[in-house]
Amino acid sequence: MNLRDIQRILKAEVLCGEQWLSREVKTGFGCDLMSEMLAFAGSHTLLITSLTNEHVIHTAEIMDAVGVVYVSGKQPAKEIIEKANHNNIPLLSTPFLMFECCGLLFTSGLKGCKRGNP
């Protein structure tokens, strides 16, 4: 599955990184705790969150995430979008709530991260 598939499944708007939507997504991780993302998610993971602060971008950079999906139609500030774009981190925004977003991706075949084995 790639980010273009994710965009279609989630009816998501691309906030930045249209040119990177062919990236492969191996796992998904839905959470609003950055410490848990760092502890349990690895590279090629799609971060799914309702947080729109700059810490999400820092976390995505550190863990080499494939991209970020904001749920509930949320969108970060323009300067955060610019920072993500500068750091090659695609950002998407979906109208779905976290629970439904994760369910749609799971039933479409995207695997979640496993405790102790990101």
Image (tube, helix red, strand yellow):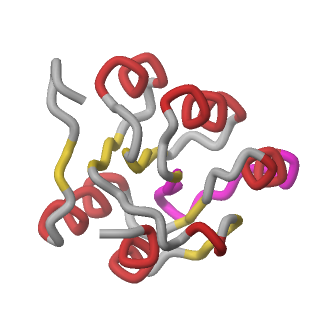
Quarter of the figure with residue 115: top left
Q: Is 108 left or right of 53, judged from the image as shown? A: left
Q: Nearer the viewer, residue 86 or 70?
A: 86
- Residue 8 lies, in percent from the top left, at 40, 82
**Residue 63 at x, y percent in the picture:** 49, 30
Quarter that holds the N terminus? bottom left
Residue at the spot x=51%, y=37% of the render? 64
On screen, residue 3 above or below 47: below
Residue sitting at x 31%, y 62%: 101
Is 62 positioned to the left or the right of 54 in the image? Answer: left
Q: Which residues are magenta?
A: 68-79
Q: Name the residue located 68 percent from the left edge and 67 percent from the top edge.
A: 15
Q: Nearer the viewer, residue 44 or 115?
A: 44
Question: Number of numbered discs present?
Answer: 0
- Position in image of residue 82 (x %, y %): 83, 52
Is 75 one of the magenta-colored residues?
Answer: yes
